[in-house]
Amino acid sequence: MENTTLEVTQIEKEEISKLTFPKTPVQKTDDELKVLKHSLRRAMILGNLHHTKIKIVFEDDKSRKEVRTTVWAVGDKNIVLKQGTIIPINRIVSIV
């Protein structure tokens, strides 16, 4: 069972490129993954058209982190933030 009481550390998007992401995904059902990908595509549209920032909660190899930023592109395996910063989709916990 996933620990839902993990502490979340806020970071700046510039720090993300220094993080290490494991290849193993955070635990999600197929339906949760489908909703996440749909939400990421919506966030990309809002980011490109209106420069809307969203909150992304993700896990690197050490802890759960949160960043407020604009999503510029969504691929099959990664999202791209400003300045080419990449977060693997399989390590994203949630977006708001």
Image: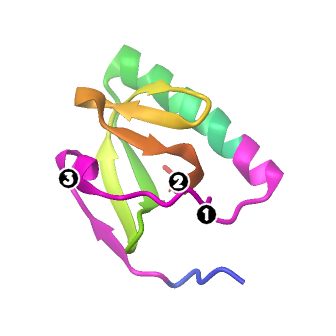
Q: Where is residue 12 in the image (x, y as percent from the top left)?
A: 20, 52
Left/right of residue 81 with respect to residue 89 in the rendered view:
left
Residue under label 1: 26
Residue at 62 percent of width and 59 percent of height:
25
Q: What stretch is highlighted in magenta?
A: 6-34
Residue under label 2: 92
First of labels 3, 2 by sequence position: 3
Which amino acid, by three-letter code, is at mark 1?
A: Val
Picture quadrant where residue 2 is located: bottom right
Is 38 in the magenta?
no
First of labels 1, 2 by sequence position: 1
Question: Callout 1: few (<14), some (14-19), or many (20+) C-alpha neighbours within 10 Å?
Answer: some
Give me the disc on residue 85: none
Question: Callout 2: few (<14), some (14-19), or many (20+) C-alpha neighbours within 10 Å?
Answer: many
Question: Callout 3: few (<14), some (14-19), or many (20+) C-alpha neighbours within 10 Å?
Answer: few
Q: Nearer the viewer, residue 36 or 78?
A: 78
Is 28 in the magenta?
yes
Q: What secondary structure is marked by label 3? A: helix
Which amino acid, by three-letter code, is at mark 2?
A: Ile
The N terminus sits in image quarter: bottom right
Picture mark count? 3
Q: What secondary structure is marked by label 2? A: strand
| Gap in angstroms between the C-alphas marked 1 and 2 | 7 Å
Residue under label 3: 15
Picture quadrant where residue 52 is located: top left
Above or below, 68 relative to 38: below
| Gap in angstroms between the C-alphas marked 3 and 2 | 16 Å
Above or below, 93 relative to 81: below
Q: What secondary structure is marked by label 1? A: loop
